[in-house]
Image (cartoon, grey):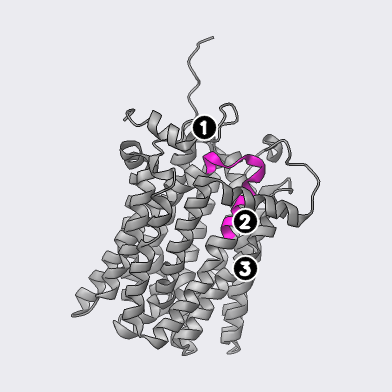
Amino acid sequence: MSGRAERPVPLFRQPQFRSFFAAHIVSQFGDRVSELAFPLLAVLVLDATPAQVSVLTALVWLPNLTGLFLGAWVDRRAHKKWLLVTADLIRAALLVTVPVAFAFDAGTLAQLYAVALLTGAASVLFNTTYPAFFVLLVDRSRYLDANSALSASRSVSFIAGPALGGVLVQVLTAPVAILVDAVSFVASALGIGRIRLADAARTGRPDDDAPGTLWHRARDGLRFTLRDPVLRAGLGCATTVNYFSFVFSALLVLFASRTLGLPSGLLGLALGAGAVGGLLGAVVAPRLSARIGVGRSIVAGAVVFPASISFVAVADGPLWARVGLLGAAEFFSGFGVMLFDVNLNALNAAVIPDGLRSRVAGAYSTINYGVRPLGALTGGALGTWLGLRPTLWIAAVGGVLCVVWLLPSPIPKVRSLDHLGDPDHPRPDLTEVGAARGGDE
């Protein structure tokens, strides 16, 4: 036998990954349509106020506050795949109720609130299950490449999805556009359901089957997250940037449609064209991290992502300038967020023990995603009190402050993911890893 290590099969030659990738991109396209159609339905059909639109955005993310406990529950479930399928089907069923209600002139803002809240709850189930499923689907040597591919597909959906959503809203009405997202969740459920994986292939930590209440298991996940220097810094940074980005996003459609005067189709086109930056960021992330290091790539993305909001804050003048500045903001925001997400997600996957993955995801969800409703509500309040433009400036400046969490942490010194979290190699201090690998590139 040869002493050389066997090369892993390329990602897209693996049928299981291809099936999940296809399900992922279909669902992402549907989401982009719905993300535009929901607030436009509230603003254009139900004449919602800034505060009401911010509540709609907040309700989507509010269920993430339960993620800490849901993650503890998910970690003990053997068949992660079927939890993902169930979450997709629940979201599809809920979204179908919107076009049905509006077809009979029975649609109300209260119904949109209820659908937003319940689909958000199903999304928490999906997101807390996904990390444990991901490590069964992808070999650890492919974590960065797999995150890059999945993030790239998400970016592609941002290129065409908003434009498609704008056209669907303008031509077929917003309720029909939401139906597209419902169909995409059914397609995603079918794709994930075809995947054949051994859910028990990884047993996780030795104490994974230890008895304990849901509260104790949830507490263990939170404690591990807050004590680990990498997870703590990454969570603090992501929570800060998410808070301020949702101050911005809660007002984006309202600002673009009412203040900038962009029609639905042109708004969707501007958002889609700008999202090319997200695709570029996802594709470039592995190469850039190989050149400057995983940690520095995370820091760079954390700055570029929120700083781009300033382009929207200064948008004015002729129509082409307004559309161009909005597109530029989305371009750099998309590039930054993908540079941040691809590298941080891969780093987290490398350092979290298998038996704690859903619990840590739940802790992240509760804190990082749980702050998003607060950001959205803050955006609505500040937009009403100070005006839309001053609120956008607050979001841009506040978001950049997220790097305060990263700079004193071990993250900027991490060059690569080699041996991090590898059960066959005890995890050293990350500062030492960074220093040891500093001259490799």
Q: Secondary structure at mark 3?
A: helix
Q: Secondary structure at mark 2?
A: helix
Residue 100 falls left or right of residue 147: right
Q: Which residue is mark 3?
A: 63
- Percent coordinates x, y for residue 32 in the rendering: 45, 66
Q: Are marks 1 and 2 in contact (CB under 8 Å)?
A: no
Distance from the alpha carbon under mark 3 to that under mark 1: 36 Å
Magenta stretch secondary structure, dominant? helix
Q: Nearer the viewer, mark 1 or mark 2?
A: 1
Magenta highlight on residue 330: no
In the rendered view, tell whether residue 185 sits above or below residue 408. Answer: below
Q: Which mark is residue 362?
A: 2
Query: Tag 2 or tag 1, which sits nearer the N-term?
Result: 2
Q: Are marks 3 and 1 in contact (CB under 8 Å)?
A: no
Q: Which residue is mark 1?
A: 428
User: What's drawn in magenta, residue-wise?
Assistant: 349-365
- Percent coordinates x, y for residue 209 in the rendering: 77, 41
Judged from this view, the residue extending furthest toward the front is 408
State whether residue 156 appears in this view: no
